[in-house]
Image (cartoon, helix red, strand yellow):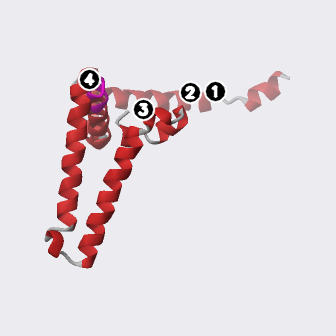
C-alpha cells in the first residue's frame, strides 16, 4: 500500500509547486515595495479607481446633495426653480424664433409645454400615489 501511495504522490512535484508560488509571491512583494509599500500601492489603486469611476462618483455626490436639499423647503424651491430654468432653456432652444418659428420648432416647444404641465400635475397629485408609484416617479417628484 505504501508503494502505491508513494507512486501517486511525487514529492518533487509539490516542492516545485511551492518554489514557483514562493517566487510569484516574492515578485508581488518587490512590485509593492517599488510602488512605495502598501501605502503607495493603496494610493495608486485609489487614484486608478477614482479615474475609472469618476462619472459614477460624481452622479452619486450630486444625487446625495439633491437629496439633502429636499429636506428643506428652501432646497425644494431651489430645485423647482432650477428645473423651471432648464425647461425654459430647452423650450427656447427648440423654438428660438418664438411665434415666428417653423412648424417643427412650434411642435417641439408645444411638447415641452405639455411635459411641464404633466410634471406639475404629477407633483400636485403625489399625495394620492402609492409607495410603488412614488418610487417609480421619484426623479420627477424630487423625492
The front one of 135 and 129 is 129
Q: Mark 1 sits on what residue? A: 11
In space, the residues marked 1 and 2 are separated at their CA atoms by 6 Å
Give the number of the disc on residue 24: 3
Per the image, label 4 sits on a secondary structure element best described as loop
The reply to whether the C-beta atoms of the residues labelled 1 and 3 are less than 8 Å apart is no
Report the residue marked by disc 2.
Answer: 15
Q: CA distance from mark 4 to mark 1?
A: 72 Å
Q: CA distance from mark 1 to mark 3?
A: 20 Å
| Of marks 4 and 1, the one in the foreground | 4
Residue 23 position (above or below residue 124):
above
Question: The N terminus appears in which quarter of the rendering?
Answer: top right
Residue 80 forms part of the magenta stretch: no
Give whichever of 69, 1 is nearer the camera: 69
How far separated are the C-alphas under marks 3 and 4?
57 Å
**In the rendered structure, which disc, 3 or 2, sits on the residue that comes first in sequence?**
2
Residue nearest the viewer, comparing 137 with 121: 121
Magenta segment boundaries in residue numbering: 66-71
Task: Give the residue furthest to the right.
Answer: 1
Horizontal side of 92 relative to 24 (left or right) equals: left
Q: Earlier in the sequence, mark 4 or mark 1?
A: 1
Q: Residues within 10 Å of mark 3 (few under 14, many from 20)?
A: few
Instruction: Give the secondary structure at mark 1.
Output: helix
Q: Residues within 10 Å of mark 2 (few under 14, many from 20)?
A: few
Q: Position of residue 75 (x, y in %)?
A: 23, 29
Secondary structure, mark 2, is helix
Q: Residue at x 34, y 45 (%)?
A: 120
In percent of width and height, residue 93 lies at: 18, 63
Amino acid at each position: 500500500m505504501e508503494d502505491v501511495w508513494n507512486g501517486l504522490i511525487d514529492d518533487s512535484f509539490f516542492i516545485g509547486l511551492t518554489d514557483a508560488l514562493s517566487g510569484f509571491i516574492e515578485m508581488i512583494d518587490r512590485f509593492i515595495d517599488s510602488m512605495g509599500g502598501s501605502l503607495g500601492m493603496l494610493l495608486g489603486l485609489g487614484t486608478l479607481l477614482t479615474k475609472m469611476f469618476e462619472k459614477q462618483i460624481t452622479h452619486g455626490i450630486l444625487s446625495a446633495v439633491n437629496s439633502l436639499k429636499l429636506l428643506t423647503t428652501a432646497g425644494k424651491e431651489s430645485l423647482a426653480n432650477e428645473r423651471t430654468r432648464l425647461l425654459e432653456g430647452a423650450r427656447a432652444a427648440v423654438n428660438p424664433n418664438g411665434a415666428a418659428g417653423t412648424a417643427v420648432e412650434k411642435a417641439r416647444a408645444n411638447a415641452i409645454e405639455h411635459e411641464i404641465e404633466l410634471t406639475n400635475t404629477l407633483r400636485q397629485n403625489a399625495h394620492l400615489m402609492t409607495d410603488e408609484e412614488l418610487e417609480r416617479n421619484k426623479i420627477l417628484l424630487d423625492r
